[in-house]
Amino acid sequence: MKTRIDDYRPAPDDSGLPLFAERPTPSAEAAAKQTPGKVEGHKFQIMLVLERLGPLTDEEIAKHTDLGLNTVRPRRGELVRAGLVQAVDEEGRTRTGSRATRWGVA
């Protein structure tokens, strides 16, 4: 029976086993698959919908652009850091009724 933390550590010769091999994190793998053109296209879609429809929540942006919410959030964050998009208010609502930030063109 294992009773100490050292009992759970991999042995030095186990480093070649798949369980202990260095692997990129899933987010690093996903980021590597994103081509610059694809990322810029998503940002363009977000900017376009915000210019046309005014302030929207992330969920509303996803709905109007047909992008997934997990695509909208990081691209919108990049636009915020670039100074192109800003938080307008917290009057938006999620589909479950929680408060949500509405984003607009800066």
Image (spheres, rainbow, N blue to C red):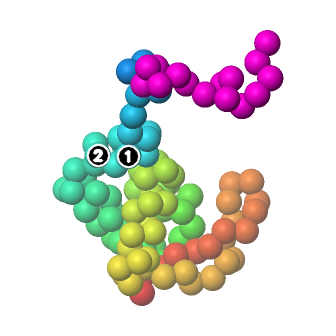
Give the residue displayed 47% in from the left and 25% down from the top: 12
Where residue 82 sits in the image (x, y, percent)? Answer: 35, 79
Query: What span is colored magenta in the figure?
Result: 1-15
Give the residue displayed 42% in from the left and 87% down from the top: 106
Count of numbered circles in the view: 2
Where residue 28 sits in the image (x, y, percent)? Answer: 38, 46
The reply, left or right, for residue 3 in relation to residue 88 is: right
Q: Secondary structure at mark 2?
A: helix
Establish if 6 lies above or below 16.
below
Give the residue displayed 51% in from the left and 52% down from the top: 69
Q: Is residue 89 visible?
A: yes
Residue 23 lies within the magenta run: no
Q: Residues within 10 Å of mark 1 (few under 14, many from 20)?
A: few
For label 2, the residue is 32
Residue 9 lies within the magenta run: yes
For label 1, the residue is 28
Front residue of 36/28: it is 28
Single out the residue that lies furthest toward the left. 37
Tag 2 and tag 1, C-beta contact below 8 Å: yes
Front residue of 62/3: it is 3
Q: Secondary structure at mark 1?
A: helix
Q: Residues within 10 Å of mark 2 (few under 14, many from 20)?
A: few
Establish if 13 lies above or below 49.
above
Q: Is residue 66 visible?
A: no
Amino acid residing under circle 2: Ala
Amino acid residing under circle 1: Ala
Give the residue displayed 43% in from the left and 77% down from the top: 80
Where residue 66 sits in the image (x, y, percent)? Answer: 42, 50
**CA–CA distance in space, label 2 to label 1:** 6 Å
